Amino acid sequence: MKKALAVTVLAALTAFAAQQRPPAPTTPAFEKMKSLVGEWKATVPGMGEVHSSYSLKSGGSSILEEIIEPDGTSMVTVYYPQNGGVAMTHYCSAHNQPHMFAKLDGTSNTLTYKMTSIDNLTSPADAHMSGVTYTFKDNDHFSAAWNLEMNGKGDAHPFEYVRVK
């Protein structure tokens, strides 16, 4: 009897807390990123077929991206609204975590992320992602050009995505 009462009280408190939650913060840039929620695939030159998924998390206040490379290696990126734009942390298979920020310029269909800081980079010469440009083409197509920097030189790797579902 006590256990049933405790479960009932806990359920009521959880429901009450959910009703008291403020709306998830957002920005135009974050709304643009939310349009990617779903499953995607891309054929990347020199790499093969890549699969990516985007899902809303934390009550709609963040987006979780998972990129699965042809060899099965998985990387995740978390996007969230910040200061009128969208920030992200990319958990790279190079074992570092660049933090980036982008803002939407007017009605542009492009978001260009630039690195603001990075964790676990042993040397600035080590391989790391220093930026990425998302170009939103239509509901079922977008591109992401990830900039890999190493030894002070950058090289953009284009991912041309098609929605799977």
Image (cartoon, rainbow, N blue to C red):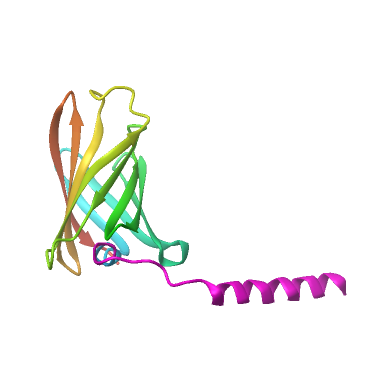
Can you say whether 151 is above or below 7 in the image? above
Query: Along the line of sight, which residue is nearer the eye, 118 or 90?
Result: 118
- Identify the residue at image location x=14%, y=33%: 154
The quarter in which the C terminus is drawn is bottom left
Magenta segment includes 16: yes
Using the rendered view, name the quadrant where residue 32 is placed.
Answer: bottom left
x then y, percent, for residue 35: 26, 67
Q: Main secondary structure of the magenta part?
A: helix
Q: In this view, does 107 lie to the left or right of 3?
A: left
x then y, percent, for residue 92: 33, 38
Q: Among all residues in the image, which is located at the extreme right?
A: 1
- Identify the residue at image location x=67%, y=73%: 13
Query: Along the line of sight, which residue is nearer the eye, 95 or 22?
Result: 22
x then y, percent, for residue 11: 68, 74
Using the rendered view, name the quadrant where residue 23 is placed.
Answer: bottom left
Magenta residues, as a range?
Answer: 1-30
x then y, percent, for residue 91: 36, 41
Q: Is residue 13 left or right of residue 51?
A: right
Using the rendered view, name the quadrant where residue 135 is placed.
Answer: bottom left
User: In the rendered picture of this protein, how many numbered marks are placed on residues?
Assistant: 0
